[in-house]
Amino acid sequence: MDLTGNVAVVTGASSGIGEAAARTLAREGCTVALAARREDRLEALADEIGAEKSLVVPTDVADEADAAALIETTRERLGGVDILVNNAGVARGDPVADADLRDLRRNVRVNLEGVMNVTHAALPTMLDAGSGDIVTVSSMSARFPQEGGSGYTASKFGVNGFCRSLRKELSDEQVRVTIVMPGPVVTELNDWDHWDGRALDPADVASAIEFVVSRPAHVEIPDITVNSTDKLG
């Protein structure tokens, strides 16, 4: 399916998977609202993509008002929201006994509550339009918990539960809900250099996101796993 003319919102677009997803969707014809806290990086990405194909909206997804403003600004400036890529995330991890509770809670506030905030804001626009794609980047940690990352793992389990329940709620609507679960990805959140290039590149996950949203309207891909051929994660 041709994505030309679609409006996509990508959170966490200042680096990693979000940055790669924004580039990919813009290349496939979308106009992309770039959301993250680091405005300077968003501006640099917008310069690369082109002003006519992008909109910079500095956003902290953990802030409900910020999330609502992101969608309202996108709707006013670009005319709607056809694709939402919930990608913003943090990975604050220590064994529970040693962890700072603020770090544990930050995982949940950004990774889970951020998804809730932006999705809640975007959904009415999609329902009014009678179509839409909500793609949320989760993690293989939601299937295979790792020690030392309890807060992160809990947040991703929550993300999966939220999205799967939402999918059931929308079963009679033309709004698709997809979970993308990557294995290890080389981003600012994770240093996988010790895997000697066997971890995923952000562009690998971006390609999976593009694959999901470019399917014909009657085709649903509920969950998709993206992993290296070495079965890491």
Image (cartoon, grey):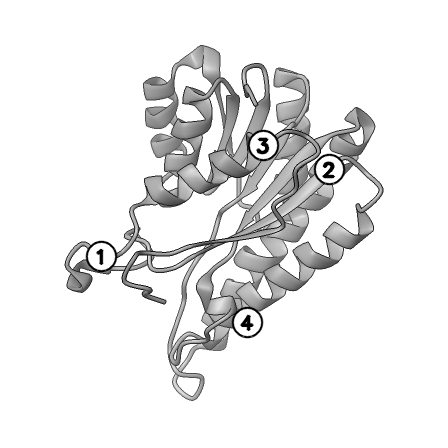
**Residue 195: x percent and y percent?**
19, 63
Q: CA distance from mark 4 to mark 3?
A: 30 Å
Q: Nearer the viewer, mark 3 or mark 1?
A: 3
Q: CA distance from mark 3 to mark 2?
A: 13 Å
Badge 3, how many Cα within 10 Å: few under 14, some, many 20+?
some
Position of residue 159 in the picture relative to residue 39 (left or right): right
Q: Secondary structure at mark 1?
A: loop
Tag of residue 198: 1
Mark 4 or mark 3: whose residue is earlier in sequence? 4
Q: Are marks 3 and 1 in contact (CB under 8 Å)?
A: no
Instruction: Please state which of residues 70 and 175 is positioned toward the viewer in this rendering.
Output: 175
Quadrant position of the N terminus in the picture: top right
Inspect the image, locate mark 3, and give the three-letter code of the amino acid beneath it. Answer: Arg
Q: Secondary structure at mark 3?
A: loop
Badge 4, how many Cα within 10 Å: few under 14, some, many 20+?
some
Q: Nearer the viewer, mark 4 or mark 3?
A: 3
User: Pointer 2: what residue?
Assistant: 175
**Residue 121: x percent and y percent?**
71, 40
Position of residue 220 in the picture relative to residue 199 (left or right): right
In the rendered image, the residue lying farthest to the right is 172
